[in-house]
Amino acid sequence: MTDPIAPIASGSSSSTGSPNSAGYPSSTGSPSSSRGGRRAARAAGEPTPPSGIRRIRLPQKLRNLELALLLFACAINAGAIVLVQLGALGAIDTQLILLGAGLSALVLALHISMRFVARDADPFLLPIATLLNGIGIAMIYRIDIAEGDTGWDSAAVRQIVWSAIAIVCAIVTILVIRNHRVLFKYTYLSGLVAIVLLLLPLVPGLGDDHDGAQVWISIAGVMNFQPGEIAKIALAVFFAGYLVRNRDSLSMVGRTFLGMRFPRARDLGPLLVVWALSMAVIVFQRDLGTALLYFGLFLVMLYVATGRLSWIVLGLSLFLAGALIASQVLEYVGNRFANWLNPFDPARYEAEVGGSYQLVQGLFGLSNGGLIGTGWGQGRPDITPVPQSDYIIASLGEELGLAGIFAILALYLLFVSRGFRIGFAGQDDFGKLLGVGLSFVVALQVFIVVGGVMRVIPLTGLTTPFLAAGGSSLVANWIIVALLLRLSDTVRNHPRLVIDG
Amino acid sequence: MNRELKRITILVFVMFLSLFVASTIVQYAQAEALANDPRNSRTLYESYSVERGPILVGGEPIAYSQPSDDDYKFQRVYANGPLYAPITGFLPVNGEATGLERSLNSYLSGQSSTQFFDQLNRLISGQDPMGASVEVAIDPVAQQAAWDALGDYTGAVIVTEPSTGRIIAMVTKPTYDPNSLAVHNSGEVQDTYQALLDDPSDPLYNRATGGDMNPPGSVFKLVVTAAALESGQYTPDSTFPNPAELTLPGTNSVVRNTDGGTCGGGAQVTLADALRLSCNIPFAELGMALGDDAIREQAEKFGFDSEFDIPTATEPSTYPRALDEPQTALTAFGQGDVRATPLQMAMVSAAIANGGIVMNPNLVDQITAPDFTPLQEFQKSEFGRAISKQTADTMVQMMVNGVENGAASNARIDGVSVAGKTGTAENGESDPYTLWFTGFAPADAPQYAITVLVEDGGGQGQEGFGNGIAAPVAKQVLEAVLNK
């Protein structure tokens, strides 16, 4: 572990002696002075900070770019909802448009908060998340119309409310966590939180068996929540902190075998623990996707931290062995594999439980979309089971076509690459690892879900980030957005100031 | 750390690349196969929710879509449904379509590759997607005449143009009303369909192109005659022994002529007379002399054992394989295991009328996009040459004789020379006969080839004959089309 975040304003003279633990770049010298006060001061021609800093800070080019992209994203989202209404209803219904406008206002609020507390954050993350979230709402709304759900039965209305909650969570995150190093302190607490969250659905009375997977909790039967979604953030924080602390012992020691340096037996502990955790998820929660997600996240972070390929080899062998045994022993895993290999086999297609009906209908839907799609509201995504959550990508593929799928995948890819950028440009290892972990978890989740739908890998139930209906997933992914924004802000402004100083 | 990160970046790119490739495979490469999967209900819904193109006869729609208030958006309507049922088929809300509704579904529903840019244009300009219209070759006058002439018989009539292969009439009876299967209530469709399936008269069969495959009986003698003339060893004047009974070698089976006597007078009979009077014994002798391979080869040149999509799929007619001598003798007058559709026999007559060349049969003239640009015009195409021009000319004369002073006399039309051949096929010891007529007119410049099939002996058991029942039907249809 090399370099904790240097005081941000190291080059900006003594004015930053304040107890601004968040590393917030206070250029006026006093953390208590209000924004309004500063503006007034500037207008009055009072002394300003050293010109070097001001020139870089003031134009907020990044935020202006973000604003433009954000408005563009909101316009596309509004257009999508209008097209859904025209396509499926044949008329315009203002209620949902107003709700959508409310969301746009919240996103803009997040944008404005960043103008104050994260000026140099990456300008692409927020518009991409907004766009994906909006397209998801439009599709969920479109399926509501097909299934005749209105009011509070409508998944779209619930999705909008959850989006609002999620964006508020993101605003709070970015306002409260002014410096990601705070999270480093809570490494082990995060680990504990992750375990507790994962165990919650197994608590009698709280767990809610949903589509066969024990990953939901239900509070008073009203609020359903998938704590595993939040757990992935806690896990990323824990892994980052733990690996930064212990990377030396994990990477340096060991003996060479077959050209690779393998770790000592006693250093295998963490790997085995995470592996056991993943296997427990497969066995007790019956959730292959989540297990793969956690384990993949851990492996990648372990590899980035230690640079040792042997960890990947060991880890992958362990996981594959586990999955192979599970496919023989556990019926639901066996079914997933059989469906993946032979979805069109009539026996699999017609199986009452664990058959390939959903997978095949999803493929039919996608093929129905073809290159350009049927257009919003013109397809039949409602034929496929759960078209608004696990299968939303098939629904989108049907109505927006291959072109739409490519656009959505490209958005995810851009999102992930912006996150990786933090890893490349970051100064402190904890921030680098956390940024990579959080972005990779999004990439892996997209791969597991979309790959399952497209028959690249066996189908497992996971939500598609930002798109799929589901509150916990939205909250988790928006918090990831906030954390990545926070990380990118420190990455961007840090080196400039060093050069400047 | 950055080196590892680079590798992970590559890993992520590979992961996404696999998604790009997989989605391209599903949505582009396999799209057609997935759309054609019978379990794909979307294809069906899709075919309903676009304004499906009409099927036209002489510019008038026989199948069209009109807006409906339910889930399917459009109701398919079949004008004059029972008359055109074997052509249009039907499009049920559950289950598979039939007829042109099935075979031209991609055009009618606007999903064919030639309509891609048209649909893209409509998508962008916000117009509702619309399917292409299909103009069929059917002539409404001929179709109605065939329907009327067949009356209450169980059977089929098919009329084609010898020089093009265009099918200008195709009637099958008994039939059904496709409207009753196009209702938007799957339970009702299921019940109606089951009732039709259970109906002993099999109204869902298209007897013109399939159904109960019948033995062709004496109309198959045209094929055997063609084989004989083509072999170069026989002429119409070649003679055969003329007994009243023929016991097939190595068996107890006895072959008799239709009237139980000899074929005309004399100890010898010519090939021309044997065909004109439709005698079985000379043909049994001829068949054994030619051998089954020669007959099969000739039959296959006429289209037997081949599948024809008109573009609706049809049942291939069959000539059996690996026969011994007695079996060959039976096939030579269209019994044994020979099976033929009216479509196939129409192709035999049409080929003789067309100087020996078999044209591929075809039901569709043109497919036109909603903006009136032609998407596909059907060109006539040759299946191949079945017999030489000389053989064809000889056979035309032999068939004209058959109508003028032979076994097909009931097809005579005043002022027009008609060429024809009747058939009366046995189905079993006491089962009703299958009655046939195939021919064309005018014989000197053939415009129309016609084949009539009447099953169940035309209601007369073993009393009815091809000349008594099938030939008058053909005559009535030919008169109607020639007087247009």
Image (cartoon, coloured by chain):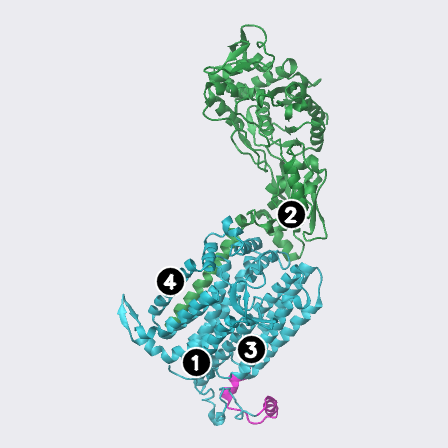
Name the N-terminal-most of marks 4 and 1: 1
Q: Colour of chain B?
A: green
Read off the magenta span.
Answer: A33-61
The residue to which callout 2 is attached is B93
Q: Which kind of residue does numbered mark 3 sit on?
A: Ala
Q: Count neighbours of disc 1 (C-alpha within 10 A) and say few if under 14, some if 14 to 19, many if 20 or more.
A: some
Q: Secondary structure at mark 3?
A: helix
Q: Which kind of residue does numbered mark 2 sit on?
A: Val
Quarter occupied by the C terminus of chain B: top right
Q: Are marks 2 and 3 in contact (CB under 8 Å)?
A: no
Q: How many marks?
A: 4
Question: Where is residue B425 drawn, in percent x and y?
Answer: 59, 21
Q: Chain of mark 4?
A: A
Q: Are marks 4 and 3 on the same chain?
A: yes
The residue to which callout 4 is attached is A321
- Does the magenta-highlighted stretch encompass residue A45? yes
Name the N-terminal-most of marks 3 and 1: 3
Q: Which kind of residue does numbered mark 4 sit on?
A: Ala
Spatial CA span between label 4 and label 1: 29 Å
Q: Are marks 4 and 3 in contact (CB under 8 Å)?
A: no
- Examine the rendered structure and indicate whether residue A432 appears above or below residue A283: below
Q: Which kind of residue does numbered mark 1 sit on?
A: Tyr
The residue to which callout 1 is attached is A188
Q: Chain of mark 1?
A: A
Q: Are marks 2 and 1 on the same chain?
A: no
For the residue pair B444 and A311, the one nearer the viewer reads as: A311
Residue B428 found in image quarter: top right
Which residue is at the far top? B266
State the mark number for residue B31: none
* Residue at image point 51% right, 84% down: A178
The residue to which callout 3 is attached is A170
